[in-house]
Image (spheres, helix red, strand yellow):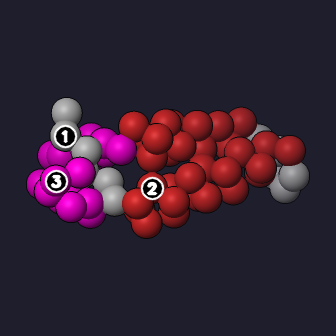
Amino acid sequence: MDKNIGILDQLVRVLVGLVFIILIFFGPQTWWGLIGVPIIAIAISGTCPLYSLLGIRTCRRGA
């Protein structure tokens, strides 16, 4: 699959994912914090399945 997530989008996703994971240890301490793992995995892969379905790209075409 082609990458469809730009650098800024990846950075925001990693930060949001880390916040969710930190919630496991601090805060409500529920397993809902594990939702951060797929968010980070999508950011690292550079391809968002939802963006692909909707035809959205936040990165340059040559990337």
Q: Secondary structure at mark 3?
A: loop
Q: Is residue 18 magenta?
A: no
Q: Is residue 31 left or right of residue 37?
A: right
Q: Please identify the residue farthest to the front as the structure is shown.
A: 62
x then y, percent, for residue 42: 42, 41
Q: Which residue is mark 2?
A: 10
Q: Amino acid at mark 3?
A: Gly
Dot label at residue 2: 1
Q: Amino acid at mark 2?
A: Gln
- The relative height of residue 19 versus residue 24 in the rendered view (above or below) is below
Q: Which residue is mark 3?
A: 62
In front here: 25 or 18?
Answer: 18
Give the mark toward the camera: 3 or 1. Answer: 3
x then y, percent, for residue 32: 66, 42
For image coordinates 39% across by 37% down, the residue present is: 45
Q: Amino acid at mark 1?
A: Asp
